[in-house]
Image (spheres, rainbow, N blue to C red):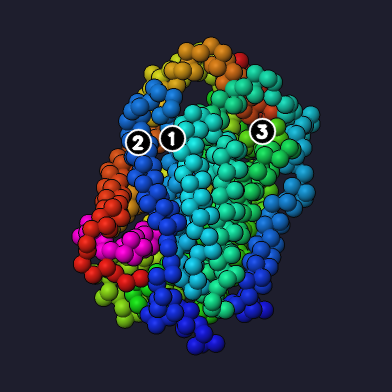
């Protein structure tokens, strides 16, 4: 058992996957990752515009297409589906064939999926700015576009599962489980949020409960397992160190599978939803500490004695700061669900601070680590600029920390003021202006990081035809 | 048993979906079967049982206004829930009268739930009857004319479109009106 586990670990360079790198074509990987990085920058502009609107509310304010209420869902959906999910899918197309020791089942199907994905994102931009949003958070895409997402997801799932079915190694590494889990759970979570919510007779609180099941699990059962699959693969790979514990990764995976889905109602604590359902969601939210602890302990213990590698390895920098943000964001989550804490932070600016630490600080950091690692390898070249990559990391880290802390402190203060009804509401808005100003300038740092990331990745890809010294071995 | 999932994909799929469906079904399909207030419109004629009133379905005009509310993404800055917090009850109140807490049976005809996650502007669950149409017209044209310091975007394409303004205001005036909570009955139209 122990030997078998060792053999499938990505960190150990003697595995058969490394012995025959030329079996992989990786065209799908390239298409998905280059597209995702492009959308990261495009949607980054939208993010900056809406951050600016908090400080200068008249900015682009008289054009219907550029009003806050239409750009905000575009920002959220663009980042979630255009950048992060596309990046995770691209990385899955890289990881799974390597862990299985075989080629991707169908490169043609992969390319078709990538083309369809681009059609989805472009339609999302047009329809959301046009005001055709469905009006359900994270499920804002109009139904025809949501149907295309389902088709693309089936194409992705068939390709990955068929690759796993033809695998050379019988035992599956933890990243493979997480990706299989992502594909299966996403199917049902997405259908719940986008289609079950629209069934006749599903209204009001019932619809809200289904929406929260989806919204919460879009993060918990789509981006979490996809991101953890990527981290479980690249932490051992980038540090060339075996994973600390296979058993602990099982504890983390199966507790996540069981616990996460119960917690949707914690988005309506103190709200018009049954008290007993709120209590169930609180209990399971606290239990989330188990899978989080199992994952974080495993990652940190893997790095034991290897921390010095961080100084000259950008992928590891992103991976380990992503791990720390994961621990923080997943400590916040259970705490928010406590009724007393919720009464202060719920609906305030604290919440976008928390959400950005999960989706940007944790899962985008992990995805960027993967992209920085994979792109030079699939193009058989070296990264265009290690220095620019290092700069992008520090811009993301400083900008991210600036944004998170500003929103936490500001949000907590805002909630404190709301709980004193003698303060007029408008005064609590005016009080937050400095916080939103800090958020905007932090956003400029983050956006600069995105631009450097885009420049570096695309230059690596475009420059790969030229002779380069010593391409990195995959 | 879970050890089998390590090398057997079929076992894996069964276990991963099985564990997921326990919580999935118990928290989505079961609750509305247990708590009937999720699907039964509010109606109460007995003052000793709390606020009186009756929830009625939207008119065609109110439905058009509802669609504008969705189209412009109003819910991204305005929640519609007076929570069980003392401060919410006072803030949703009017002229010293505290508002009743929001209950599931007030939202039965909402085909798109608008509870919201972020309160950048004030909560709108009891906005119905607080301001008249002229106030809303001026406010949509430029919110800062009426509320200095506001960061709400201007909506001139609604303020200058008589039909859309009428529809949207008609929708807003329904918010929180199922419960007759103001003793003077001084609701604006």
Contact? badges 2 and 1 (CB < 8 Å): yes
Q: Are marks 2 and 1 on the same chain?
A: yes
Query: Which corner quadrant of the image does residue B67 belong to?
Result: top right
What distance separates the C-alpha of mark 2 from that of mark 1? 9 Å
Measured as percent of width and height from the top left, residue B119 is found at: 48, 38
Q: Are marks 1 and 3 on the same chain?
A: no
Labels 1, 3: front one:
1
**Dot 3: element:** loop
| First along the sequence among labels 2 and 1 | 2
Give how far across and how far down residue A267 sits, in percent: 56, 49
Per the image, the residue denoted by label 2 is: A49
Residue A166 appears left or right of A317: right
User: What chain does mark 3 sit on?
Assistant: B
Question: Which is nearer the eye, B30 or A471?
Answer: A471
Query: Magenta span has A89?
Result: no
Contact between labelled residues 3 and 1, with CB atoms less than 8 Å apart: no
Q: Position of residue A328 (x, y in %)?
A: 42, 62
Question: In the rendered image, which residue does mark 1 sit on?
Answer: A71
- The span shown in magenta is A364-390
Looking at the rendered image, the disc whose residue lies closer to the viewer, 3 or 2, is 2
Q: Is residue A295 above or below residue A135?
A: below
Give the residue at x 53% y 29%.
B71
Asked if residue B122 is positioned above or below residue A37 in the image, the reply reads above
Q: Which mark is residue B110?
A: 3
- Quarter of the figure with the N terminus of chain B: bottom right
């Amino acid at each position: 058992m122990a030997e078998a586990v060792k053999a499938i670990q990505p960190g150990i360079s003697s595995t058969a996957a490394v012995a025959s790198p030329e079996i992989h074509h990786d065209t799908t990987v390239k298409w998905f990752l280059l597209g995702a990085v492009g959308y990261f920058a495009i949607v980054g502009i939208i993010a900056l515009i809406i951050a600016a609107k908090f400080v200068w509310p008249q900015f682009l304010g008289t054009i219907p297409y550029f009003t806050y209420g239409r750009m905000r869902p575009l920002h959220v959906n663009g980042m979630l589906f255009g950048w992060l999910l596309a990046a995770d899918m691209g990385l899955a197309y890289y990881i799974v064939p390597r862990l299985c020791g075989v080629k991707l089942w169908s490169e043609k199907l992969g390319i078709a999926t990538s083309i369809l994905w681009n059609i989805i994102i472009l339609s999302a931009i047009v329809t959301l700015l046009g005001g055709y949003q469905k009006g359900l958070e994270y499920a804002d895409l109009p139904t025809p576009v949501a149907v295309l997402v389902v088709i693309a997801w089936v194409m992705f799932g068939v390709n990955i599962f068929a690759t796993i079915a033809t695998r050379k190694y019988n035992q599956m590494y933890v990243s493979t489980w997480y990706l299989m889990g992502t594909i299966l759970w996403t199917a049902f979570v997405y259908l719940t949020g986008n289609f079950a919510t629209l069934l006749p007779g599903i209204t009001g609180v019932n619809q809200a409960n289904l929406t929260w099941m989806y919204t919460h699990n879009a993060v918990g059962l789509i981006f979490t397992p996809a991101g953890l699959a990527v981290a479980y693969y690249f932490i051992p790979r980038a540090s060339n160190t075996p994973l600390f514990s296979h058993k602990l990764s099982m504890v983390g995976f199966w507790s996540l599978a069981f616990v996460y889905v119960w917690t949707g109602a914690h988005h309506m604590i103190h709200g018009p939803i049954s008290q007993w359902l709120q209590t169930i969601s609180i209990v399971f939210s606290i239990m989330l500490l188990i899978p989080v602890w199992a994952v974080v302990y495993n990652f940190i213990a893997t790095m034991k004695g290897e921390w010095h590698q961080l100084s000259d390895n950008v992928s590891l920098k992103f991976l380990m700061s992503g791990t720390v943000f994961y621990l923080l964001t997943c400590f916040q989550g259970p705490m928010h669900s406590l009724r007393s804490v919720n009464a202060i932070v719920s609906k305030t600016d604290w919440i976008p601070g928390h959400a950005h630490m999960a989706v940007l600080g944790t899962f985008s950091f992990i995805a960027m680590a993967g992209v920085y690692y994979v792109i030079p390898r699939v193009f058989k070249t070296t990264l265009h600029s290690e220095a620019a990559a290092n700069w992008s990391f520090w811009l993301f880290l400083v900008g991210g920390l600036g944004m998170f802390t500003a929103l936490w402190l500001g949000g907590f203060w805002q909630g404190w003021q709301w709980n004193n009804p003698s303060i007029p509401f408008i005064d609590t808005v005016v009080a937050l202006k400095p916080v939103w100003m800090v958020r905007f300038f932090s956003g400029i740092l983050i956006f600069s990081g995105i631009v450097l990331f885009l420049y570096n990745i695309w230059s690596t890809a475009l420059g790969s035809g030229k002779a380069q010294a010593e391409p990195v071995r995959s | 048993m879970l050890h089998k999932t390590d090398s057997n994909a079929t076992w894996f799929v069964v276990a991963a979906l099985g564990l997921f469906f326990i919580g999935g079904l118990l928290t989505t399909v079961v609750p509305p079967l247990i708590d009937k207030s999720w699907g039964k419109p509010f109606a109460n004629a007995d003052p000793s049982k709390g606020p009186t009133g009756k929830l009625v379905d939207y008119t065609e005009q109110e439905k058009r206004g509802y669609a504008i509310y969705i189209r412009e993404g109003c819910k991204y800055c305005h929640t519609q829930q007076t929570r069980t917090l003392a401060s919410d009850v006072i803030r949703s109140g009017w002229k010293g009268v505290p508002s009743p807490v929001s209950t599931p049976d007030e939202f039965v005809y909402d085909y798109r739930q608008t509870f919201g996650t972020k309160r950048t502007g004030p909560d709108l669950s009891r906005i119905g009857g607080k301001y008249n149409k002229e106030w809303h017209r001026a406010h949509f044209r430029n919110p800062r004319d009426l509320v200095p310091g506001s960061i709400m975007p201007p909506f001139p394409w609604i303020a200058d479109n008589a039909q859309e303004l009428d529809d949207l205001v008609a929708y807003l005036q329904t918010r929180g009106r199922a419960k007759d909570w103001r003793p003077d009955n001084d609701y604006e139209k």
